Image (cartoon, grey):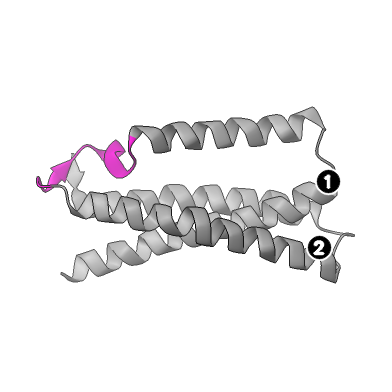
């Protein structure tokens, strides 16, 4: 069992690692595809995921974690069950999409770069929440 604020650090590490890996895959597919349209599309993907999914997720889970009545929690409680299910579906879908060859490398470059950057930012925001919780 860990202190509840440590759950914010665990969320930071999990989301930042996932974001880094997805961003890395996207960037590895980008050589030869760097142009203003693709960069703009990656920025749009980033902004959509940042604003409508991961920004809300960081707020929702940070609020839930800090509201736990007991100071010590099981380490896996940085997420709730639906969030673990969503993560599993996203990971499985991403692996399947790349392995199937259905998505062209240009799509992987654009989409994964935007998605990975948004995930990485979510991880960093969980880290910021952890730092703030440590100060109080």
| Residue ranking furthest to the left | 70
Check residue 21 for magenta coloring: no
Up the image or down, 18 lies above or below 38; here it is above
Left-right relation of 58 to 36? left
How much space separates mark 2 and mark 1, taking CA atoms? 12 Å
User: Which residue does the image show at 50% across and 62% down from the upper left?
Assistant: 121
User: Which residue does the image show at 51% across and 32% down from the upper left?
Assistant: 88
Up the image or down, 77 lies above or below 19; here it is above
Q: Residues within 10 Å of mark 1 (few under 14, many from 20)?
A: some
| Mark closer to the chain start, 2 or 1 | 2
Q: Which residue is denoted by mark 1 in the rendering? A: 105
Task: Identify the magenta region.
Answer: 69-80
Does the residue at mark 2 contact the one at mark 1 (Cβ under 8 Å)? no
Left-right relation of 44 to 56? right
Q: Residues within 10 Å of mark 2 (few under 14, many from 20)?
A: some
Up the image or down, 128 lies above or below 58; here it is below
Regarding residue 9, the answer to whether it shows in the image is no
User: Which residue does the image show at 72% across and 34% down from the upper left?
Assistant: 97
Depth check, mark 2 against mark 1: the one in front is 2
Residue 56: image tag = none
Q: Position of residue 125 (x, y in %)?
A: 41, 63
Q: Secondary structure at mark 1?
A: helix
Regarding residue 22, the answer to whether it shows in the image is yes
Up the image or down, 11 lies above or below 130; here it is above
Check residue 76 for magenta coloring: yes
Q: Which quadrant of the figure contains the N terminus?
A: top left
Q: Which quadrant of the figure contains the C terminus?
A: bottom left
Residue 38: image tag = 2
Q: Position of residue 37 (x, y in %)?
A: 83, 66
Q: Secondary structure at mark 2?
A: helix
């Amino acid at each position: 069992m860990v202190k509840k604020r440590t759950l914010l650090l665990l969320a930071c590490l999990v989301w930042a690692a996932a974001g880094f890996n997805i961003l890395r895959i996207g960037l590895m597919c980008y050589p030869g595809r760097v142009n203003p349209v693709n960069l703009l599309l990656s920025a749009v993907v980033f902004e959509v995921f940042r604003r409508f999914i991961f920004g809300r997720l960081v707020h929702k889970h940070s609020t839930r974690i800090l509201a736990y009545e007991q100071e010590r929690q099981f380490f896996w409680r940085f997420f709730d069950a639906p969030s673990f299910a969503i993560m599993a579906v996203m990971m499985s879908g991403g692996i399947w999409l790349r392995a199937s060859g259905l998505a062209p490398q240009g799509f992987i470059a654009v989409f994964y770069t935007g998605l990975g950057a948004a995930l990485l930012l979510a991880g960093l925001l969980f880290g910021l929440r952890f730092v703030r919780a440590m100060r109080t």
